[in-house]
Image (spheres, helix red, strand yellow):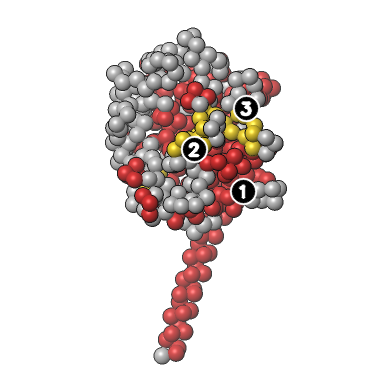
Amino acid sequence: MGNLIELKIMRKSTLLVFMVLVAYLTNAQNSNNFKNVKYKNLFQEYGYKKKDINKKLSKAYYDVFEGPNRVYFQVGDSMGYVSDIKNKDVRTEGMSYGMMIAVQLDKKDVFDKLWRFSKSYLQHQSGPREGYFAWSFNPETMKQNSPGSASDGEFYYVTSLLFASNKWGNKTGIDYYKEAKRILDAMWSKDGTGNIYNLINTEHRQITFVPEGNNYNWTDPSYHLPAFYEIWAAYAKDGHEEFYMACADTSRVFLHRATHPVTGLNSDYTEFSGKPHPTRWMPPGFRYDSWRVPMNIAMDYVWTGKDAEWKKDYATRFQNFLRSKGLDTYDDQFNLDGTKPDFILQAGPEKKLRHSIGLVSTAATTALIKNDKGSKDFIDAIWNAKLEPYEDGYFDPYYDGLLYLFSLMHLSGNYQIITPN
């Protein structure tokens, strides 16, 4: 009997060691693969001079973070925030985008200030939402507008913190890895208590629109970042590596279903099946959130190289559709079949369709997928674009500005997987 018990213990121990070894080897393989990723300076390949490219990127950063129309503001000596100027609030979207930009461009001081503000004012330190962030904050009253979370903000927080840990280490004032893991550990502790759930719908293995109530049961295509899951699988070391890799694959399949077979357009909100999801505030359609989808797909193509043939087909469809609407004049909102929508989501003082620099920016990143001379018109379009007020006076240095800066980073090879030093 004693020998039988010992044999069972040995088998369990062997299985445990095997599972740990597999996880370790998977992480090591992912990390090594990341080191072999090639980041192209597509502007340079299309004939633009390196000094001019660097100058354009530096000016874009200056405009968004330092210039007279900046959206970044310091609070005292140790904190700072990114503001959605037109809506007069601070959002986890902008804060986490700002942190990603800062770690990519080696702006440690800005990164640390954004994180300290996020931790102090946006992150819940107790209760059912512990570890999550309030998605909207009023910088005038210094109070949260809404305690709930928008899942994409947490995704960018985690990934940018892991990159910061890899880039700067964890002994320079902030333990970036510990902070990233706290968010992930908090995510895995949410079981519906207080109506708060995991950021990922664990049944469907897809990111939720909001990890709260019924909003846990549908999604936003622009939140789907397959490459981020693979970063977590490699560097988070939280025991969920296999699940994250499965989520990455699921997101890629989801994007097939969510994008129109002819135009490549997707709805701002969808069911987990990819079917458009209407809400009480607007019907389905390609609008502001959707602008991010082509950039996310381009990022996944460069960072992982997976599902490459579908991505090339997607980029071709999407580019051809925009060309059919006039490359210098296409609108920024559509029905999925490419027709003009009856409902226009308002941004600014009036409901109006524009040729927005935010969409021009993300559309240009699809050139990273096609990477042929046929994409030169998209590269030239973003190169010639200017972050300035539109003819009617409307100006959005926040959303347009951040997407513009992201696109310049991608297209110049300055948006990379940051591996450990």
Q: Earlier in the sequence, mark 2 or mark 3?
A: 3
**347, above or below 132, in the image:** above
**Mark 2 or 1, nearer chain start:** 2
> What whole-number distance in Å separates the C-alpha atoms at marks 1 and 3?
22 Å
Residue 105 visible to an observer of this rendering? no
The quarter holding residue 380 reads top right
Disc marking residue 144: 2
Residue drawn at x 64%, y 37% as measured from the top left: 79
Q: Secondary structure at mark 1?
A: helix
Q: How far is mark 2 from mark 3, CA to CA?
A: 23 Å
Disc 2 crowd rating (10 Å Cα; few below 14, some 14-19, many 20+) is some
Q: Secondary structure at mark 2?
A: strand
Q: How much space separates mark 2 and mark 1, taking CA atoms? A: 24 Å
Instruction: Check residue 176 in the rendering and tell me which mark sits there, or answer none.
Output: 1
Give the image location of residue 21, x and y in percent. 53, 64
Q: Amino acid at mark 3?
A: Phe
**Which residue is under mark 3?**
65
Task: Kindly identify the amino acid type of the residue bearing the numbered disc 2.
Answer: Gln
